[in-house]
Image (cartoon, rainbow, N blue to C red):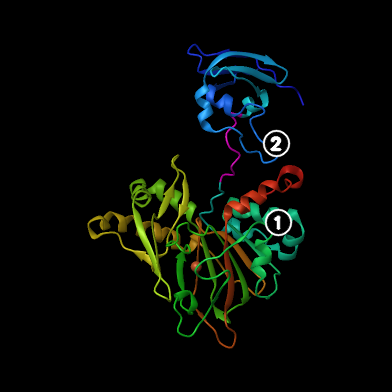
């Protein structure tokens, strides 16, 4: 590897930042506090934790002097007087930005439907197959597996490959099947509009895993839609409506069988400080309507988004069979089902929740795909 060599290193006139020029004309401008915080020796070698607290930065507000030496810039800080080395590699990488994977939106189901499902046993045994599944969840929000058998508890074996089950008020695992005297519409044969699960929880479970143990003889097709793709479409076609849904928190609530009431207030479309869509929370069954005086523009925007999500061309509709597994981002991909008739066989899906940050963390340690390509 060619050693990094800056073409210039200068302290700004007010001594508060260092300007490093690189061959080709790129520059890195780093304030004194950043230099101190990223200096060599500032981190515990085992944990990677920063060793000093932020109060120390009061002694590193200015640069008393700077010089280059092998692979580093040596900076003397003022008013504290400490001298520290900052590696050129850290300075060169400072402008590179994050390596976060941009979501691959799917406004229609074609691309996701065409991706062949991954073999369940391969995902358990082979890191390349696991990587394929996790990549799909991060990029498209959903992955399908086949061949998982029909043993209850199977979802735990999959989640153990990349993280931990998130237990909720529905238990560690939950069974989606028809129940006598059901306390939840999911446990009846009615169809369910597309929705995200548990919007009344704070925080919302970020990942859902569903395993088909038994399929209905008639009906019960599973449906999935990319909420991010249709939020983007709404933003492009009707930006004022997008803004209403992003700016108006609404309450979702659920009262459990013992009378406990879960409630959370969130916007239907959640955006980051940079304006990116980072979450969709939508479940008409548990929605508490906004106050009537604010309801007219909100309902207009909500119905527009709801219709986009439920357009037949928007959704992936697929009959899932015993042994099939779906893993999806519960803050992005909405799921639903057509009504079903049980007959002699009862439809039975077993599911659990997990955390998508754990999935991403596992993905970060897996070896890259062969050839550097992949999904
Ligand atoms: Fe659901």
Question: Would you identify the image quadrant in which residue 282 lies?
Answer: bottom left
Residue 296 found in image quarter = bottom left
Q: Nearer the viewer, residue 261 or 20?
A: 261
| Direction from residue 85 to residue 186 in the image, left or right | left
Magenta region: which residues? 94-102
Answer with the quarter of the image where residue 316 lies: bottom right
In percent of width and height, residue 71 lies at 71, 21
Tell which of 225 and 96 is nearer to you. Answer: 96
Note whether 77 is above or below 46 in the view shown.
above
Q: Is residue 365 above or below residue 309?
A: above
Q: Is residue 233 left or right of residue 161?
A: left
Tally of numbered discs: 2
Does the magenta run of residues contain 97? yes
Residue 312 versus residue 34 in the image, above or below: below
Q: Measured from the top left, where is residue 190 in percent x and y?
A: 46, 77
Q: Position of residue 333 (x, y in %)?
A: 52, 58
Find residue 76 and report its horizontal and vertical position in percent: 59, 16
* Inter-mark Cα distance, 2 to 1: 30 Å
Instruction: Please name the predominant secondary structure of the magenta segment in the image.
Output: loop
Residue drawn at x 58%, y 77% is: 348
> SS for tag 2?
loop
Whether residue 24 is visible to the viewer of this picture, yes or no, is no
Which residue is nearer to you in this view: 8 or 241?
A: 8
The quarter of the picture where the N terminus appears is top right
Earlier along the polypeptide chain: callout 2 or callout 1?
Answer: 2
**Disc 1 designates what residue?**
130
Residue 68 in view, yes or no: yes
Question: Where 283 falls versus 51 (above or below)?
Answer: below
Q: Does 262 appear in magenta? A: no
Q: Return the mark for residue 366.
A: none
Determine which residue is flagged by label 2.
45
């Amino acid at each position: 590897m060619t050693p990094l060599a800056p073409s210039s290193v200068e302290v700004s006139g007010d001594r508060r930042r260092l300007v490093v020029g690189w061959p080709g004309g790129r520059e890195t401008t780093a304030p004194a506090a950043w230099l101190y915080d990223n200096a060599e020796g500032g981190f515990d070698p085992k944990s990677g934790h920063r060793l000093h607290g932020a109060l120390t930065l009061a002694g590193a507000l200015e640069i008393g002097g700077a010089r280059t030496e092998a692979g580093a810039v040596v900076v003397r800080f003022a008013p504290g007087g400490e001298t520290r080395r900052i590696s050129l590699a850290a300075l060169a990488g400072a402008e590179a930005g994050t390596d976060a994977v941009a979501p691959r939106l799917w406004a229609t189901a074609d691309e996701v439907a065409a991706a062949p499902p991954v073999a369940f046993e391969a995902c358990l045994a082979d890191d390349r197959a696991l990587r394929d599944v996790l990549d799909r969840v991060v990029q498209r929000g959903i992955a399908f597996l086949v061949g998982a058998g029909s043993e209850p508890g199977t979802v735990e074996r999959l989640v153990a490959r990349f993280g931990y089950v998130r237990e909720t008020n529905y238990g560690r695992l939950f069974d989606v099947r028809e129940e006598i005297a059901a306390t939840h519409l999911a446990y009846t044969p009615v169809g369910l509009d597309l929705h995200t699960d548990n919007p009344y929880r704070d925080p919302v479970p970020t990942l859902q895993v569903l395993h088909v143990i038994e399929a209905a003889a008639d009906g019960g097709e599973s449906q999935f839609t990319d909420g991010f793709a249709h939020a983007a479409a709404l933003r492009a076609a009707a930006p004022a409506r997008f803004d209403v849904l992003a700016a108006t928190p609404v309450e979702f609530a659920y009262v459990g069988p013992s009378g406990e009431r879960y409630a959370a207030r969130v916007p239907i479309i959640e955006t980051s400080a940079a304006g990116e869509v980072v979450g969709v929370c939508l479940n008409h069954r548990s929605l508490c309507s906004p106050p009537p005086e604010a309801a007219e523009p909100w309902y207009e925007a909500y119905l527009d988004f709801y219709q986009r999500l439920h357009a037949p061309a928007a959704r992936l509709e697929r009959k899932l069979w015993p042994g099939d597994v779906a893993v999806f981002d519960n803050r992005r991909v909405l799921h639903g089902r057509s009504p079903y008739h049980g007959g002699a066989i009862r439809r039975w899906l077993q599911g659990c929740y997990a955390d998508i940050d754990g999935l991403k963390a596992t993905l970060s340690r897996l070896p890259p795909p062969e050839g550097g390509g992949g999904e």
